[in-house]
């Protein structure tokens, strides 16, 4: 299943999750920027799916698996920023990559929690 189909599936029934998932995932269409300070590269993309612990970013350029990157997601007038790790070996990653949030500042965790609450209410 490609990421668009996954996002549509989640939008229609976000609770229908793969049982391996620790946290629910929600469809989100938000612009994002990803930077790899070690490789001195950056790319713009779109976050299509988000959860408490990570997201899926559609981007024209994929970063190296296991790279630690800086992530900036813009949703309306708010921006979520955190470090993330590119998850290797994601089947059907298509034109993007799965990211695992790490080292997120407490105020950013609170913002993410608000976003997730809002998205969960919309999907009911």
Image (tube, rainbow, N blue to C red):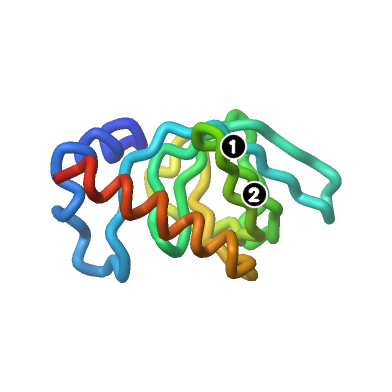
Residue 16: % across, % down: 14, 53
The answer to which of marks 1 and 2 sits earlier in the sequence is 1
Residue at 36% across / 37% down in the picture? Answer: 3
Question: How far across and how far down the image is residue 25, in percent?
Answer: 31, 53
Quadrant position of residue 22: bottom left
The circle drawn on residue 71 is 2
What is the tally of numbered marks visible in this picture?
2
- In which quadrant is the C terminus drawn? top left
Q: Residue at x 61, y 66 (%)?
A: 104
Location of the N terminus by quadrant is top left
Report x, y in % for residue 54. 47, 58
Residue under numbered circle 1: 32
Describe residue 104's horizontal placement relative to residue 91 as left or right.
Answer: right
In-front residue for pair 72/34: 72
Relative to 90, does residue 94 appear above or below in the rendering? above
Give yes or no for contact between labels 1 and 2 (Cβ–Cβ under 8 Å): yes
Q: Residue at x 20, y 57 (%)?
A: 17
């Amino acid at each position: 299943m490609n990421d668009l189909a996954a996002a549509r599936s989640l939008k229609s029934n976000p609770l229908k999750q793969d049982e391996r998932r620790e946290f629910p995932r929600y469809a989100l269409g938000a612009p994002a920027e990803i930077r790899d300070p070690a490789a001195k590269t950056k790319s713009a993309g779109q976050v299509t799916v988000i959860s408490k612990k990570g997201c899926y970013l559609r981007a024209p350029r994929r970063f190296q698996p296991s790279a630690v990157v800086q992530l900036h997601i813009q949703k309306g007038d708010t921006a979520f920023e955190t470090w993330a790790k590119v998850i290797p070996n994601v089947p059907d990653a298509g034109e993007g990559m799965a990211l695992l949030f790490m080292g997120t500042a407490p105020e950013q965790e609170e913002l993410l929690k608000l976003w997730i609450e809002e998205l969960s209410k919309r999907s009911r």
